[in-house]
Amino acid sequence: MTGAAIPSRWQVDILVYEDDYSYPVLLLQPGRPDDHRRLRRLLGRAGLASPSTWEWERGIWPLAAGCEVALAERPAGVTVHVGAHCLTVGFRFAEPPQPWLAAARRQQQVLFVLLPPRPHAAEDTLIIDDVSRLVRPAERNGCLAGTIPLGGH
């Protein structure tokens, strides 16, 4: 949380609906079950929820009114504010991808997905590979998803 690094994997991606609507996605997968439980409680209180099959297949996500996303240019990063806590993803030597930033500004929100830890996750380079496996409700157990509005506009 604030001031404490959590071993995790993260990824930004863009979902495209009907060839016109691009949605920025921020995926986070903590490496340890304890960290995942803490984040799940914190984000659940802020409005993120486990999507039903119907929601998951149609891309319908709850609005997490208790959260806010901030985009930083220097140092480059994305910060999710949840009450008194901050979850920051830094880009170190690179900038956030311009199409991702453009989608975030256009939609005025970011889709955030918290994934449960998975054994041997470090062997996979992309988290999106994990998301594509989340077809059945039992496989989505432990996931939270929701759209988080951009702040500072």
Image: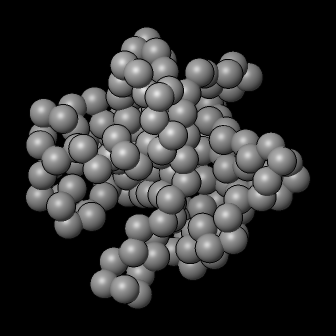
Who's the residue at 67% across and 39% down the image? Answer: 88
Question: How is colour applied across the structure in the image?
Answer: one colour
Who's the residue at 46% across and 76% down the image? Answer: 22
Q: Position of residue 14 (x, y in %)?
A: 48, 66
Q: Position of residue 68 (x, y in %)?
A: 57, 51
Q: Position of residue 66 (x, y in %)?
A: 48, 46
| Front residue of this view, candidates 150 and 143 | 143
Toward the top, the furthest residue is: 34
Who's the residue at 77% across and 58% down the image? Answer: 95
152 left or right of 26 in image? right
Decide: is 88 above or below 36: below
Decide: is 141 above or below 109: above
| Front residue of this view, candidates 83 and 126 | 126
Where is the C terminus found, in terms of image quarters?
Answer: bottom right
Q: Position of residue 99 (x, y in %)?
A: 62, 73
107 left or right of 56 in image? right
Decide: is 115 above or below 63: above
Who's the residue at 54% across and 33% down the image? Answer: 9
35 left or right of 37 in image? right
Q: Is residue 67 visible?
A: no
| Front residue of this view, candidates 129 and 76 | 129
Toward the front, the furthest residue is: 123
Decide: is 145 above or below 153: above
Q: Is residue 17 visible?
A: yes
Where is the N terminus found, in terms of image quarters?
Answer: top right
